Image (cartoon, rainbow, N blue to C red):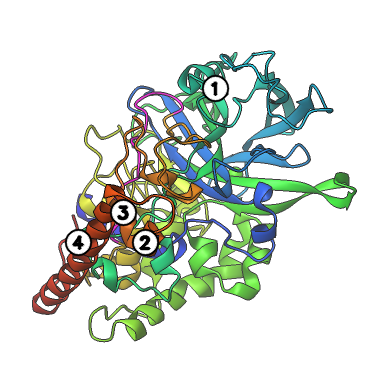
Amino acid sequence: MRKLALFAALTALAIAVPLSFGSSHREAPLTSIDPTGDDTDTYAFTAQDAPGALTIVGNWVPFEDPAGGPNFYKFDDNAHYYLNVDNTGDGVADVRYLFDFDTKVRNPNSFLYTNGQPVDSVDSPNQNVVQTYSVTRVAKGHSQVIARNVPTPPSNVGPKTIPNYDQVQAGAIEDLPGGGKVFAGQREDPFFAALGRIFDTVNLTGAGLGNQGGGVDDLAGYGVQSIVLQIPESDVTRDGKPVADDKAANAVVGVWASTERQAISVKGRGKGPYTQISRLGNPLVNEVIIPLGQKDRFNRTQPKDDATNYGKYVLEPELAAVLNTLFPGQVNAPEKTRTDIVQAVLQGVPGLNAFPGAAGKNATDTLKINLGTPPTASPQRLGVLAGDNAGYPNGRRLTDDVVDIDLQVVAGALKGNMVPLGDGVNQNDVQFLSEFPYVAPPKPGANPDAAFGSQLKAIANADGTSTPASYSATGGSGGGGDNGGPDALIWALIGAGALALAGLGYRATRGRGKSKGIATT
Ligand SMILES: [Ca+2]
Ligand SMILES: [Ca+2]
Ligand SMILES: [Ca+2]
């Protein structure tokens, strides 16, 4: 039974691979020109410090450069942001949480983000731009506002404006009346991937074809707008009761995020009924599985219709054929009848995270999580593929390496074709928090540790120290310019070393891959 579950889980992973490359940053033509409506990642997990609760993280607005002033990042007042939960398995939301934002500018005659005085709390009168929000729970046709006028923290402008950002953002954590917590605001993007290489026609060779590190996290240092919601299980289960254990009939729920906008836009304002413009369940489904001509449609349609609308793209994922073409003789991914992927990603693994009974056959792109699965003390980044059943595709934790998981699943891991695919990036660039809201605070816009352009802020650790090593391989030549002296030499050496290591890693991995299969951990 355990083995069956693992196999199923692996299958799911395969599906997820094509989906999860960039997770869902700029994945469709329309959302790529509408960043505030673009959901980038969805996570659903049971937190170590919150058993008995479902924790959901929904992220929007990809590639926020923390230095992007004077109009820093926020949610769009004109959009409706949703976190959706299906507790019956039909792909129709049974419980929805609507997040509706409202921005006030205290002094419209100033261009500044503040009045020039430091901001020391989320309620500081020194802020010039303040965004608040309400949370509305919608279930069984009934809407109830469960929080209103909740403050978001300001964007992390820099230490002169906000000397103690941790303190300020902590004030934005709001307790909910029925139990649970909510937070909305800028965070460091928890998604990690060698995006540049992946979308350079899956140019994984420089990082080693395997999953042994050496890749560059191209999202490092960028921010996103996060909504983090933690609610008692009984708020989302089908019978309104807590989950007794992982065999309970109410244990599985499916989670996804979505964005809605009004149908007509006039001078920045909406008009008419709201319509869905984006949605996100499993990572990388729309990004990698759905073809370009269908991506905007995917964002408009509902999970309940996924099997009819998009089943064929999962059964014959383009990525499998692409991998076979790009890495001849090394991947050998099955290209047709990928029911393993359908089950793992869209149906859930029987005995693990599939809905009980006939509903377990429904193929819907929701992030299915068994709320009765206890969290793992030491999570494995490859989740179920590595024998850690509390990780992806049984929900998704912040630490799950969905890129590697998806690549390996698409390659056929659930069918026994173990190939050590990966992008060489194994974890986020900064540590996650052990307590709510779990996602790390954003990097500061004015960063005294950044050597050059704003994108290089990623080199600064959470503690403010500078560690440029992993970044010199990205482009190298930026070392000239205004930062001469010892730094330039160090950067050059680091760059040369990284390139040499990358080459060695590639050769070593190729050698291993030819002789035998893969190590998946
Ligand atoms: Ca339902
Ligand atoms: Ca990150
Ligand atoms: Ca990875």
Asked if residue 434 is among those painted magenta in the image, a careful observer would answer: yes
Please tell me which residue lies in front, 124 or 281: 124
Distance (Cα) linking label 1 and label 3: 31 Å
Asked if residue 55 is among those painted magenta in the image, a careful observer would answer: no
| Residue appearing at x 67%, y 47% in the figure | 36
Q: What stretch is highlighted in magenta?
A: 424-437
The dot on residue 488 is: 3
Quadrant for ligand 1 reads top right
Q: Is residue 52 left or right of residue 366?
A: left
Mark sitting earlier along the chain (2/3): 2
Q: In this view, does 342 lie to the left or right of 97?
A: left
Distance (Cα) linking label 4 and label 3: 14 Å
Residue 155: x %, y % from top left: 59, 32
The dot on residue 162 is: 1
Circle 2 residue: 474
Three-letter code for the amino acid on which mark 3 is drawn = Ala
Q: Can residue 214 be seen in this view?
A: no
Circle 4 residue: 497
Indicate whether 178 appears above or below 424.
Answer: above
Three-letter code for the amino acid on which mark 4 is drawn = Gly
